[in-house]
Image (cartoon, grey):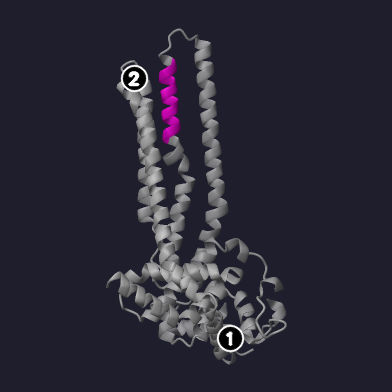
Amino acid sequence: MSELDIQSEFSQLVVRNRGRLTAIARSYARGDADDLLQEILLQIWRSMGSFEKRASLDTWCYRVALNTAISWQRSVGRRKLRLPPGDDDVEQIPGTDDGHDGPELLRRFLQTLSDTDRALILMYLEDMSGSEMAEIVGIREGALRVRIHRIKRRLAEWKVGDA
Amino acid sequence: MNLDDFKSDWKQRHNELAQDRFDELASEVVARTAKLEAAILRRDLLETLAAVVVVMFFGVFLWFDSVPALMKIGIVIIMLGVIEIVAVLSWTRRRDDRPSHDAPLLDYCKAEKARVDRQIQLVRNVTWWYSGPILLGCCVMMYGLLSSVPELSRLIFYGFLASFYACFLAAGIIIHRGNSRSARKDFIPIRDELAELVRSLEDGVSENGSKCSDS
């Protein structure tokens, strides 16, 4: 594949997955979402040459993004993430006064989860199939279902003040 | 709250947010990659250049017959030490290149943990592979140099040598402590977090998932 083809495929891929990639960046980086998003795009671009067509390109892209996010917060974002979550790091959402709309509440809930559980919920919210999720994470589908069920139960009991 | 109620809102919200700076960030990627690769190349070149300068500077003394043999041995140790540092750094970078970003999360975390473990080893042993050979070379060189001055009184000879060695020993201890602290503060917490992440993922590998539901 020529450099131009790779560039064109990259553009199509990231545009198609822009919502998913933004969700990952915002869920793992909070205030520095743009920095993480740029790092994710950079890693996708640098990894494009190693795509072996064993998975779908979108699944592959999600895997790269997730690995980058988890690795990134361990280096750049580590200190910031150790700070307790507070109101100041909840970005105000246009059209809401208190930032307590559904997706924002969910984002707050995600901050209370471990890296792994957060990844599972992000994939669940994107309507990924069990096999896709298992492929991305590298664990069995059955175990994934059990974990998601457990997190759903936790969410049902969760209150905003618990964040 | 029910997770399924949020799915469409969640996707819509992030598609909206992606409109803001996404195109700009995506278009910067190629230029940023080139910059990153140039920076890596520059760093490697600078490291090699610094080593060449040191080797050439000390190497000049080897050509003079008047330079005592012991001093020459010290110089050779320093030169070999510098070459060894460049070789170790370069080999480590090649071997310890970050794990492939497109691996499944579990494999990625295991590879990343192994990489951090190797970094911890490298930092902990920095005294032996980095500063050690150079410090040893300097000490041998200084002994050779002072031995070649017969008119030096024994008191001055040993006094100067002892002070010189004490300074180098202190430098060695400071370097060793600094690196041990860096390993403890910077790398071990990352390794522990990765180990915890691997453990949490491997819990999910269990056949029936009972571990997951219990925890």
Query: Residue B149 versus residue A134: which sits nearer the camera?
Result: B149
SS type, badge 2: helix
Give percent across and percent down for residue A87: 71, 73
Image check: B35 left or right of A155? left
Quick one: label 2, few (<14), some, or many (20+) residues within 10 Å? some
SS type, badge 1: helix
Magenta residues (range): B133-146
**Magenta-highlighted stretch: main secondary structure?**
helix
User: Which of the chains bears the disc numbered 1?
Assistant: A
What is the residue that sits farthest to the top in this orientation? B151
List the residue tagged with mark 1.
Answer: A152
Query: Residue B112 versus residue B58: which sits nearer the camera?
Result: B58
List the residue tagged with mark 2.
Answer: B69
Residue ID at (40%, 44%): B47
| Quadrant showing the C terminus of chain B | bottom right
Image check: B158 left or right of A46? right
Amino acid at the residue labelled 2: Ala
